[in-house]
Image (spheres, rainbow, N blue to C red):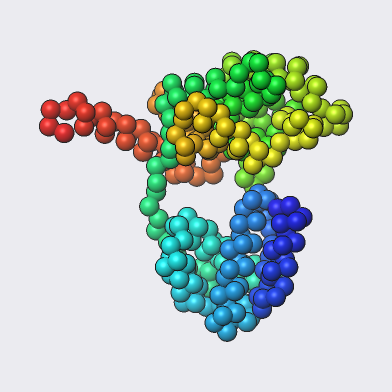
Amino acid sequence: MSATQRQAIVNALRALSLGPTVIDFLDYLVVEAGLSHNTILAYGRDLRQFCEFCDENGVDRIEKVEPHFVREYIRQEGRRQKCESSAKRALVAIRMLLRFAKLTDLIDDDGAAVLEMPKTWQKLPVVCNERQVAKLLDAPQPEEQFYLRDRAMLELLYATGMRASEMADLKTSDINCDIGYVRCLGKGRKERVVPMGRMAIRMTREYLLGLRAKLAKSDQETHLLLSRTGRPLTRIEIWRLVKKYALRAGMPRNLTVHTLRHCFATHLLNGGADLRSVQEMLGHADVGTTQIYTHVDHERLRNIHKQFHPRP
């Protein structure tokens, strides 16, 4: 998280009974756990809300946080129509906080062990077909000032399945256009190496030799994607650029940067790639996370069966 975001969370937590413990826990995550900035920021927000619930119910010390109390909090969040994934993340944050409290001898018993994760429905991701993706990649026009940068960005996102945050963090030293590989640092700072397609290599090379050399204000700037003023593009700016070109290409309004990641995985599996290879390229720790894309393919087969079978 940025210094400003962290300070805002810390200021809010200081007024809460469990706030000091949560602040120490967030510092631990930053220094020891290696989680992404966005994950730590989300945990901070979740735990601030949990601390507010604790104060409202007279739970002013970490040792008073019992499993039944946490379950009641999660049920309340469900009644507030919090989405399932957000409630699940909040429970993960609370479990990690309790384990931290046990690790630092703030509590004797870790009640997190008996807290089961809520069962969530697995939603199929939005996926576009290859023709739609081609229209998106062609959306930047050669006469536009940032054509080379934006075309290279889109080609890389689809060719590698990178997340927006990974794209924003990408350095020029992470790309080898000669052998066609890009090095990504994913969640938990885990490194993976992903091949690049021919078009991604071509557009990236043209951008590096042309527009980027003009945008960079000094040789000290190492980020790949640079703005008009020569500073690195943020993940939010990358998200907005993808949205801009998606609208121009007539794509679904709910298309995001992550949609290209879904398309990358689904199109590989539809083309015959094995699940383990796709898992490695996506940087998933659990192959079960990657299996969602096999369900996408099953949905396509079901639609074909319904359309052509004489007794659908």
In the image, taking residue 96 as reference, residue 175 lies left or right, namely: right
Tell me if residue 14 can be seen. Answer: yes
Q: Nearer the viewer, residue 213 or 156?
A: 213
Residue sitting at x 59%, y 16%:
199
- 68 is higher (above) or lower (below) than 188: below
Q: Quadrant of the C terminus?
A: top left
Residue 237 percent coordinates (x, y) = 66, 38
Residue 284 percent coordinates (x, y) = 53, 41
Residue 264 percent coordinates (x, y) = 50, 29
Residue sitting at x 76%, y 30%:
228
Residue sitting at x 43%, y 62%:
81
Q: Nearer the viewer, residue 271 or 228?
A: 228
Residue sitting at x 60%, y 79%:
55
Residue at the far bottom: name it. Answer: 58
- 74 is higher (above) or lower (below) than 201: below
In the image, taking residue 7 as reference, residue 272 lies left or right, namely: left
In the image, taking residue 15 as reference, residue 59 lies left or right, namely: left
Residue 140 percent coordinates (x, y) = 60, 22
